[in-house]
Image (cartoon, grey):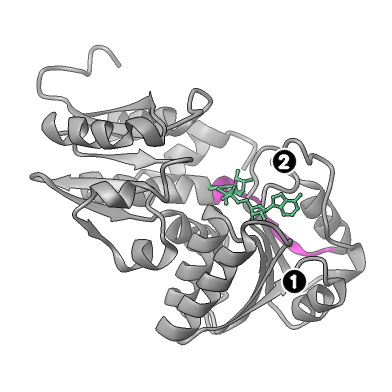
Amino acid sequence: MEKRISGYTTLIGLLATPIKHTSSPKMHNEAFQYLGLDYAYLAFEVGNDGLEDAVKGLKAMQARGCNVSMPNKTVIHKYLDKLTPAAELAGAVNTVINDDGVLTGHITDGVGYMTSLKDAGFDIIGKKMTIVGAGGAATAICIQAALDGVSELSIFNQDDEFFARAEETVKKINEKTNCKAKLYRLEDKEALRREIADSVIFTNATGMGMKPYVGQTYIEKDMLRPDLIVSDVVYQPAKTRLLELAEEVGCKTINGLGMMLFQGAEAFKCWTGKEMPIEHMKEFLFGDNK
Ligand code: NAD
């Protein structure tokens, strides 16, 4: 890596906190090196307080852009010049491109999710999805699914501070896309059972299944059936309790590793104009754990 970096190397940053655990520098720097592209990707521990200065700094230093993660995803738009339609609808940004001082905010989580399904051979366009979650990941997925042509979305969330965000998302989807979206409380198990029953895919887009909820799920086994696709955005652990249950029933399953890879690939394309070398990256990042 140090042999690669020179006075010509262009910076791409990641602004988030906590951030030391991130695998994004590993992913992007490997892809730059593999394709011989003269960029370097570094993570910076920045929260809401330092965000405006950090964005100005990256712009002043002519960085090509940055990724943004929690807690900055819903705040950074204030410091940008433009947003893509998906970022505008999702009310969140995870990727910024600097085109000669003009900063555009993108959201690649939803594209990453939809691409991961396609990559796994799952076609949900024109069909119904039931999804649980109303945070950053879920909102981006719902918006992109609606923009891509998923016909119906049944969204569930527990009765917490995210529920109001889900109400807004449902309103925007129904007003601005051809998808029909409905919202339910996760506590309503009969509604959950009924909505899953005529969906082709069920998605967990909450932290359920990862720390501190490892080994847990709100799903009951008899809500699942063999021809259902069961998808979990969690990738640590790679097999959540939900995916274990789904495998026992014989469902087709997919975890969050693909979403993680393809949201990165989409950001990579925004900055470099090049496709990330996906097969190489799968081997490099996941090895046998695909
Ligand atoms: P967030 O904090 O924005 O949203 C949290 C969501 O989880 C809310 O809908 C909340 O109501 C729900 N929730 C919290 N505790 C719950 C519980 N006990 N039972 C049911 N629902 C609960 O978080 P986020 O950024 O949307 O992330 C959600 C999950 O998605 C995390 O596990 C994160 O690791 C994962 N994620 C994966 C990728 C990927 O690339 N695979 C990308 C982003 C996020």
**Real-space CA distance between mark 2 and mark 1, rounded to the nearest whole angstrom:** 22 Å
Task: Please tell me which residue is depicted at 22% across the width and 44% down the height of the picture.
Answer: 272
Whether 155 is drawn above or below 175: the answer is above
Note whether ligand 1 is within 8 Å of mark 2.
Answer: yes
**Residue 5, image x and y in percent?**
20, 18
In the rendered structure, which amino acid carries the disc numbered 2?
Met
Q: What residue is shown at x 40% (from left), y 37% (from top)?
A: 48
**Residue at label 2?**
210
Q: Is residue 238 above or below residue 195?
A: above
Q: Quadrant of residue 89?
A: bottom left
Count numbered badges in the picture: 2
271 or 50: nearer the eye? 50
Q: Residues within 10 Å of mark 1 (few under 14, many from 20)?
A: many
**Height in image: 74 above or below 149?**
above
Q: Which residue is mark 1?
A: 228
Left or right of 257 in this view: 144: left
Residue 87 in picture, x, y percent from top left: 36, 61
